[in-house]
Image (spheres, rainbow, N blue to C red):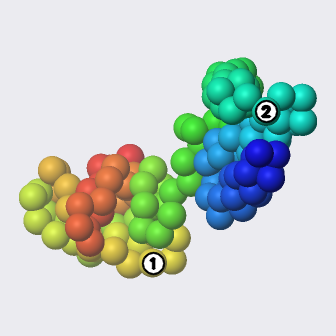
Amino acid sequence: MWLFWLVAAGIFFVGEIITVGFLIFWLGIAAVLAMLTSFFTENVVIQTAVFVISSIVLILLTKPLINKYISKDDKVATNAYRVIGKKGIVIKKIPADGIGQVKVSGEIWSATSNADIAEGTKVKILEINGVKLIVAPL
């Protein structure tokens, strides 16, 4: 039965390499522990219990540790969303509820706002709606 647990551990480790969740790794470790147990007993129920219990314990013990060192709030703005929060300058007047143009980081964007914003005014990008920036004067 040790060969079954060895193959299972190998599958779990390869699965962990393919995925990025860092969960399947602990199943591989549990399969190794079950394989070691199979050297001492041939009872499949005991081997399976070692696998299940060690999987649960390893996952529960490492989850707080992983949450401590890996922050999920560090989102990196990519593509167009990187301009949200940046400052730009109006290069074509933006009428209230109309469309004008804003230059941000060397790029020219269509922009809209709730208020009239004159050309040359510095603005802050609040959000993106489709291909238009929603801006507010500074």
Q: Position of residue 116 (x, y in %)?
A: 17, 56
- State how far apart marks 1 and 2 are (Cα): 69 Å
Mark 2 and mark 1 in contact (Cβ < 8 Å)?
A: no
Residue drawn at the location 73% of the way across and 28% of the way down: 43
Binning the other alpha carbons within 10 Å of mark 2 as few (below 14), some (14 to 19) or many (20 upward) gives few
| Residue 81 placement, left or right of 9 | left
Q: Where is residue 130, by image quadrant?
A: bottom left
Horizontal and vertical percent position of residue 134: 26, 57
> Which mark, by number, is residue 42?
2
Kindly tell me whether residue 54 is visible in this rendering.
no
Q: What SS does tag 2 mark?
A: loop
Q: Position of residue 120 (x, y in %)?
A: 36, 66
What amino acid type is highlighted by mark number 2?
Answer: Glu
In primary-sequence order, the first of circles 1 and 2 is 2
Q: Determine which residue is flagged by label 1.
A: 107
* Residue drawn at x 51%, y 77% as measured from the top left: 106
Q: Is residue 129 visible?
A: yes
